[in-house]
Amino acid sequence: MPVRNRVRPVLVVLVAALMLPAWTATAHAAVTCGGTGPNVRALTPATAPLSPGQSGWLSAVWTADRGVSDWSTKVTAPADVKVTYPTTRGGGDTSLYGNSILVGGTKDLTAFRLNVPYTRSGVFPVTLTTTYTYVDAGTTSNWWSGYQGWQSANQGPQSGWQDQSDADHDYWGNGRGYQYPGNCVPAAPVTQTVTATVLVPVVPASGAAFTQTTTRASVKAGTASWVNVGFTGGTGDLADFAVAAGTPLPAGVLVGYPGDRASAGLAGDASLVGEASDYVALRFDATKVPVGSYLIPLVIRYTAALPVSVLGKITVDVS
C-alpha cells in the first residue's frame, strides 16, 4: 500500500508533462523586401526630321519612376545610316544630358548624331538600347519562428508583440511562441537593359546647297596674299568640297592654292557639313596688277547625290 502511494505523484508529473505543447521551430529562407525594378521608358516616338544627305544631332527623352545610374545608350540604325556619339564619353555610346544618373520622376535626354545618305527618303526606325544600374530595397536575412507553451517566469502567458532589449528577437502571444525577424539589407546593384524604337523622318531638302559668305577681299598692290573665302552649308552635307579659279582671269592676276595643289579644299574638313561654316584659302598674286577691282571667277566642286560643279565669283580690291 505505501508503494502505491509513492507511484501516484510520479504518474501525475508524467501526465502533466505530456500535456504541455511540443516545441516546434521553422527556418524561413531569405525573401525580397523590395519591389519590382524601375520603370524606365522612352517618351519620344519620333525625332526631328532630317533631309537626304544631312547629318544632324537628334535626341530622345527618357523618364523613370525610380532613380537609376551608370546610364549608357547605343543606337542601331540601318546599314546606310552612320551613327556617331558625343566625344565626351569616347565616342562609343551616349549618356544623359545632365550626367549618367536619371532621378526618379524626372526627364532627361540622350543625344546622338545620324548621317543620312542622299538615297534615303520616307521614315526609318532606329533602336535605342539602354543599360543602367539600380539598387533594389534588398532582401531579408534568414529568420526563425517557434511555437511552444512559453510564458515569462514572472508574468505568466504573454500577448501582443513586445521587444526584448536583452535578446535579438521579439515574442508574441498568449503563450504561443516567438520569432526572430530578419532585417532588410541592401541588395547588390542590378544591371538592367531596356530598348526603345524611335522613328526618324526624312523630308526633302529646301534652299541652296551652300552659300558663299565671302564675296569681296582686299590685297595690297605689289604683293601676294592669302585670302579666306567662306562658305556655309545648306541642309545636306557636301563631300569633297573644293574651289579653284575659273577662266578667264584678269590680265596679270595669278591664283594659287595650299600645297601647290590644283584647287583649295576646306580648312576644317573635306566635307562642307550642312548648316556649318568653313573656308578655303586662295593666294592672290597682285605683284603685276595695277590698283583697281578685279572680278575673279571661281569653280566650286562637291559631291552630293552625284558630283556637282557650279560657278561662283569673288571681287578682289587691289589698293
Image (cartoon, grey):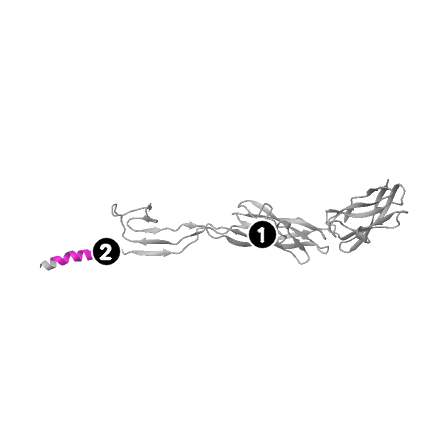
Q: Position of residue 274 (x, y in %)?
A: 72, 49
Label 1, label 2: how many angstroms apart (C-alpha)? 66 Å
Tell me which segment is drawn in magenta.
5-16
Q: Secondary structure at mark 1?
A: strand
For the question of whether residue 208 can be seen, the reply is no
Name the kind of residue labelled 2 in the image: Met
Q: Position of residue 10 (x, y in %)?
A: 16, 57
Closer to us: 286 or 152: 286
Secondary structure mostly seen in magenta is helix
Judged from this view, the residue extending furthest toward the left is 1
Q: Secondary structure at mark 2?
A: helix
Mark nearer the viewer, 1 or 2? 1
Residue drawn at the location 35% of the way across and 54% of the way down = 144
Q: Position of residue 41 (x, y in %)?
A: 56, 50
Residue drawn at the location 36% of the way across and 56% of the way down = 27
Label 1 CA crowd tier, 10 Å (few <14, some 14–19, many 20+) = many
Q: With 217 as the anchor, is 51 left or right in this view?
A: left
Q: Which residue is mark 1?
A: 72
The answer to which of marks 1 and 2 sits earlier in the sequence is: 2
Name the kind of residue labelled 1 in the image: Ser
Image quadrant where one finds the C terminus: top right
Q: Is residue 78 magenta?
A: no
Q: With 172 as the anchor, is 270 left or right in this view?
A: right
Closer to us: 200 or 7: 7
Q: Position of residue 106 (x, y in %)?
A: 55, 44
Q: Which residue is mark 2?
A: 19
